[in-house]
Amino acid sequence: MVDVQPTETEEAAAEPFPPPIFVKIFRQVFTVALTFIGLTAITFIIGRVMPADPVLAIVGDRASTDVYEAMYIKLGLDKPLLEQYWIYLTNVLQGDFGKSIMTSRDVLDDLIRFFPATLELATVATLAGIFLGVPMGVAAAVNQGRWIDHLVRVVGLFGYSVPIFWLGMVALLIFYGWLDWLPGPGRLDVFYDGIVEPTTGVILLDSAMQGEWEIFRNALHHLVLPGSILATFALAYIARMTRSFMLDQLSQEYVLTARVKGLSPLGVIWRHAFRNVLVQLITIIGLTYASLLEGSVLTETIFAWPGIGQYITTSLFNADMNAVIGGTVVVGICFVGINLLSDALYRFADPRARQ
């Protein structure tokens, strides 16, 4: 038989076009763009139909009709809603979220100023939830039905059931009011304000980089109470899901086979069962982190934490809709970004997902 080798033209024709990698990238970009458009559209429409009047928030209740109408036209509220949204979307893509009525600054500048505080708080709470919740969930699954399992389940139930605002006020009353072990609300004591140059906006990082260790300790002490409150929720969720995932893996046949082969209990738990759980945990941790970034409003309000949650809440009470819409859009973008990062880590941790 004659072995006929395919020509270069035939090989090129056999390859799919476009390549699968470009198809995946296009789908990902299209999904992100569609999500962004949907997020901005829903947020913008809700901001426009709310009973709060941004014109009155600017001109005041005693302004004349002419002044009111002039500001109404200046804000573009006389245009159709679809045209208003198109103008807003175009400005947002250029980094312009409008001006804040409350602070008289660009909303983007306010978000850059307030968001690092929320990022710092949510990051510390998530890390605490991971380092405590994962071992607790594994221990509960390994000791199913024993006192450790019951204890972890009670902690998880406590973290889910107790309202954050009540827990925050009780923590302030006990550890700040009665025992005086920890400082009160805020990120720093008043006499430390303005000493550290806000390079990143995260006080712990900025003070450490500038060698201001006394300010670092003070900021860390202020972070303990609000971080612990948020970490309670993160710990409860991560521990509960870790326990559920581990129970499912420990009942698989490959675990029994590993034990029969004489592998150590720790090796079976951490090297075999937990490796299969890790992929699922990445998604859970990503969702937890995103939830803390967007759901820390009550904690920031109770502890006077100058983050984006408190900024959005205060802006809403002052009918500052540019700030409310801008803050909500930024939080939504962070949520989408964390999901994309979780998906990338998922593919990195599981070789089967890369094929």
Image (cartoon, rainbow, N blue to C red):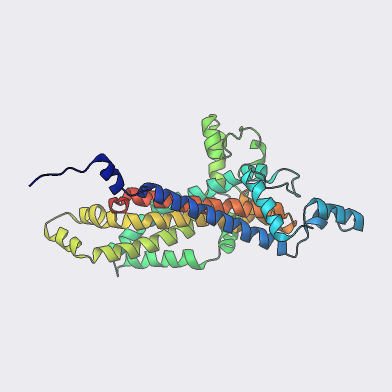
- Residue 287 in view: yes
x then y, percent, for residue 177? 61, 54
Q: Is residue 46 left or right of residue 274?
A: right
x then y, percent, for residue 105? 73, 43
**For residue 254, what is the image quadrant?**
bottom left
Q: Nearer the viewer, residue 188 or 108?
A: 108
For image coordinates 56% across by 62% down, the residue present is 164
x then y, percent, for residue 290? 50, 54
Whether residue 53 is situated above or below residue 180 in the rendered picture: below
**For residue 65, what is the image quadrant?**
bottom right
Q: Is residue 285 left or right of residue 66?
A: left
Q: Residue furthest top?
A: 211
Q: Residue furthest front?
A: 2
- Residue 303 in view: no
x then y, percent, for residue 347? 34, 50
Whether residue 253 is situated above or below residue 279 in the rendered picture: below
Total count of labels: 0
For image coordinates 62% across by 42% down, the residue present is 112
Q: Nearer the viewer, residue 346 or 147?
A: 346
Q: Is residue 115 left or right of residue 71?
A: left
Q: Residue furthest bottom?
A: 145
Q: Nearer the viewer, residue 114 or 154?
A: 114
Q: Nearer the viewer, residue 47 or 79?
A: 79
